[in-house]
Image (cartoon, rainbow, N blue to C red):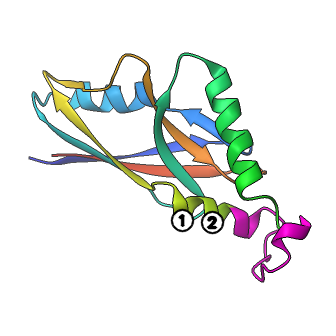
Amino acid sequence: MPQQARLAIETRGAGLYEFTEAAARFVREAAVDAGLLTLFVRHTSCSLLIQENADPDVRRDLSAFFARLVPPADDPAMSYLVHRDEGADDMPAHIKAAILPVSLSIPVNDGRLVLGTWQGIYLFEHRTSPHRREVVLHLA
């Protein structure tokens, strides 16, 4: 029988927020031996990633890379952007969410997430101000 939950993640602005333990707890409490955990973020200006969780430099470098790839709308290189309703980070956040995943699938075996040794699950916040984000966890 599929099980589902919603996880709220409070962000403090742009960056990566790990929630591996919350997802693992959901799987443990579901008491399912084998299956597939699907994660889906219900927003258009953030993403989900599986990424290294050992060295914080990886998170800093990813944030810096995407800031260079898609700078704020007030950067001269982004002068073509029209959608700026919520500030200079609004449309760039939508662009980042369009090129990064908003859903993930992770196998479950022996009642545990089948992640690699250094893999963690992250919400990648693309907005500069704090937000309350919701991730749906679906285990089948």
- Badge 1 marks a residue whose secondary structure is helix
Q: Residue at x 43, y 28 (%)?
A: 20
Q: Which mark is residue 98?
A: 1
The image position of residue 85, as x and y in percent, is 79, 77
| Residue 98 in sight in this render | yes
Q: CA distance from mark 1 to mark 2?
A: 5 Å
Does the magenta segment cover residue 57?
no
Q: Quadrant of residue 9?
A: top right
Q: Quadrant of residue 98?
A: bottom right
For mark 2, does the 10 Å Cα neighbourhood hold few (<14), some (14 to 19), or many (20 or more) residues?
A: some
Q: Image check: 66 left or right of 78?
A: left
Q: Residue at x 21, y 36 (%)?
A: 107
Q: Image check: 64 left or right of 103?
A: right
Q: Residue at x 80, y 76 (%)?
A: 84
The image position of residue 50, as x and y in percent, is 44, 36
Q: Which mark is residue 75?
A: none
Q: Quadrant of residue 109?
A: top left
Over which residues does the magenta segment extend? 74-92
Q: Which mark is residue 95?
A: 2
Give the amino acid type for the residue marked by disc 1 in the picture. Ala
- In the image, residue 1 sits, relative to residue 78, either above or below, namely above
The image position of residue 67, as x and y in percent, is 75, 50
**Do the residues under discs 1 and 2 have CB atoms within 8 angstroms?**
yes
The image position of residue 58, as x and y in percent, is 62, 27
Q: Residue at x 62, y 50 (%)?
A: 132
For mark 1, does the 10 Å Cα neighbourhood hold few (<14), some (14 to 19), or many (20 or more) residues?
A: some
Give the amino acid type for the residue marked by disc 2 in the picture. Ile
